[in-house]
Amino acid sequence: MSRDEVVIRVDRLGFAYTPGRFAVRNLEFEVGRGEVFGLLGRNGAGKTTTVRLLTTLLPPTEGTAYLWGKDLRTCGRAERARMGVVLQSESLDFVSVERNLTLYAYLWGVPRERAKSRAEEMLSLFELEAVRQRKPWALSGGERRRFQVARELMHDMDLLFLDEPTVGLDALTRKRILDYLAQRAKDGLSIVFTTHILQEADQLCHRIGVMQDGRMRAHGPPADIKRRYRGARTVEAEFERSPTPAEREELLAILRREGRDLAVVTFELGLLAFRAANAEDLVAELARWAHARSIDLERISVREATLEEAFVTLVSQDADPPLGAEPELP
């Protein structure tokens, strides 16, 4: 991506809460204009710390990052005015939900009429119309989270950070919010968000970064991550007739001999399903066997790996020691 398109450039960024014990270290990635970048990882992987660094809430211990080409160590009010931030911590005021939204817009310089119309839009989008006169502290957990995200979207921005924005929300509300964010990204808004819902990241993100123990294990488009770390894949084959017991044993012996990490899911009547790392190779073996036995294959398919499966494969691989861990003695 060209220099003009880069909104965030992270250069060997690291942060230690105490000397020598890093929460994140040696992070390197970029986020472009109109791009949605997802940070994935287990609890404690360093996602929230990374967001706090990039929003200038924490000072880097080492390395740095650049926002619109400016070192975040020197970023001030002008850069922060171009950002929106929704963290997991709550900050609720003692005025109504509706008044909260309009006041927040006024603080960001949004004209009064525009603030009112934007508030109506957010109340509808986040299904807060029925609680518009309640105080935020009186909302349910899911309503409070919707309110937090809605309030941040009351002003115009170029870069939006969302830390677990859909936690506690039902599937329908999540979809509406994700669709809205996708449209905002098409309009040029850059978005960085963390999530534990991998299907969500697969749907929304142009690129993702997988963090583990404070380090970036891999980053790239979801399709590339799935292809590289897909692990075992599921094969389903439907036969014209049910193989005899002897034929079943023969076929399974071939698959087990040729398969890597093979696990049979089911083999009942004329349906066979199994998982293997070398699924494509076994499809060819299966087709040859069926042809030799004059058994027609009605259907055969290889299901693509999900992002969740790729994530599990990736974080299960040998990783660097946790940051701040004592080195092993020789």
Image (tube, helix red, strand yellow):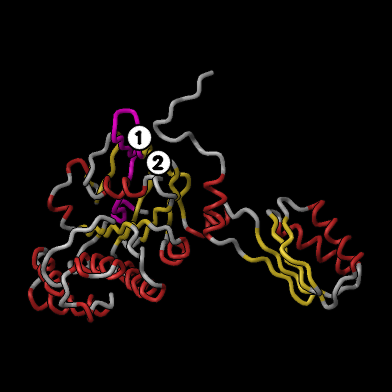
Q: Earlier in the sequence, mark 2 or mark 1?
A: 1
| Cβ atoms under marks 2 and 1 closer than 8 Å | yes
Q: How many marks?
A: 2
In the rendering, at what x and y percent does residue 14 appear? 33, 37
Residue 294 falls in which quadrant of the image? bottom right
Magenta stretch, main secondary structure class: strand
Q: Amino acid at mark 2?
A: Gly
Which residue is pictured at 54% across the width and 18% down the height? 330
Q: CA distance from mark 2 to mark 1?
A: 7 Å
Q: Which residue is mark 1?
A: 22
Tell me if residue 63 comes above or below residue 285 in the rendering. Answer: above
Q: Amino acid at mark 1?
A: Phe
Q: Which residue is mark 2?
A: 214
Which residue is pictured at 39% across the width and 76% down the height? 172
In the rendering, at what x and y percent does residue 277 appear? 68, 53
Q: Is residue 105 left or right of residue 205?
A: left
Which residue is pictured at 42% across the width and 58% down the height? 196
* Magenta stretch contains residue 79: no
Which residue is pictured at 31% across the width and 45% down the height? 49
In the rendering, at what x and y percent does residue 99 appear? 11, 73
Q: Is residue 323 left or right of residue 238?
A: left
Q: Magenta segment range?
A: 2-23
Residue 289 falls in which quadrant of the image? bottom right
Q: Is residue 170 left or right of residue 316?
A: left
Q: Nearer the viewer, residue 89 or 259?
A: 89
Mark 2: few, some, or many residues within 10 Å (few <14, many ≥20)? Answer: many
Dot 2 falls on a residue whose secondary structure is loop
Residue 187 falls in which quadrant of the image? bottom left
Mark 1: few, some, or many residues within 10 Å (few <14, many ≥20)? Answer: many
Tell me if residue 309 comes above or below residue 269 in the rendering. Answer: above
